[in-house]
Image (cartoon, rainbow, N blue to C red):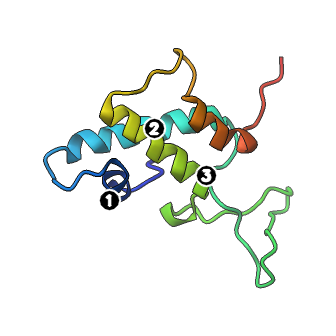
Amino acid sequence: MMYISLCEAKAHCRVDHDVDDVDILGKIEAASSMVKNYLKSTSPYEPARDSEDNPTFDSNGDPLTDEDLNAIRYEVRAATAILVQKLYDQTLDSQPGYLPNEVQAILYPLRTPTLA
């Protein structure tokens, strides 16, 4: 699953040519996987909403989502775009096993914590 489109990634990286499209697509997939792994079981999608803008839930109490690229939370999209840019510019300088601080700051409120 890719959390941002090729057009979004190219705009964020300020790329206006098609030469690196295959490379950028690979970086989108890698960045999306990194974000997914950080979020753990948290859904990257916005909850579906009823006519009064309240989240809707299934019979188990879990929020219903519209699993479409446009329904991905803005925070997830922004974090993915930052990661793609860092991968593209080769400036990913975080500790092994950790996302860059700015990406963690964006995603942390959404993350399902690990219990020891």
Give the residue at mark 2.
83
Give the residue at mark 3.
75
**Rendered position, 104 above or below 5:** above
Amino acid type, mark 3: Glu
Query: Farthest residue toward the left?
Result: 19
**Rendered position, 23 above or below 74:** above
> What's the distance in space between the residues labelled 1 and 2, CA to CA?
15 Å
Q: In the image, is 24 to the left or to the right of 46?
A: left
Q: In the image, is 77 to the left or to the right of 105?
A: left
Quadrant position of residue 83: top left
Residue drawn where x is 49% and y is 44% of the image: 80
Q: Which mark is residue 7?
A: 1
Residue drawn where x is 54% and y is 16% of the image: 95
At numbered mark 2, what does the secondary structure look like: helix, strand or loop? helix
> What's the distance in space between the residues labelled 1 and 3, CA to CA?
18 Å
Give the camera-side residue of 35 and 86.
86
At numbered mark 3, what does the secondary structure look like: helix, strand or loop? helix
Give the camera-side residue of 26 and 98.
98
Residue drawn where x is 70% and y is 44% of the image: 42
Question: Looking at the image, is mark 2 or mark 3 earlier in the sequence?
Answer: 3
Question: Looking at the image, is mark 1 or mark 2 earlier in the sequence?
Answer: 1
Specify the quadrant that holds the C terminus: top right
Question: Looking at the image, is mark 1 or mark 3 earlier in the sequence?
Answer: 1
Instruction: Determine whether label 2 and label 3 are within 8 Å by CB.
Output: no
Q: In the image, is 76 to the left or to the right of 29?
A: right
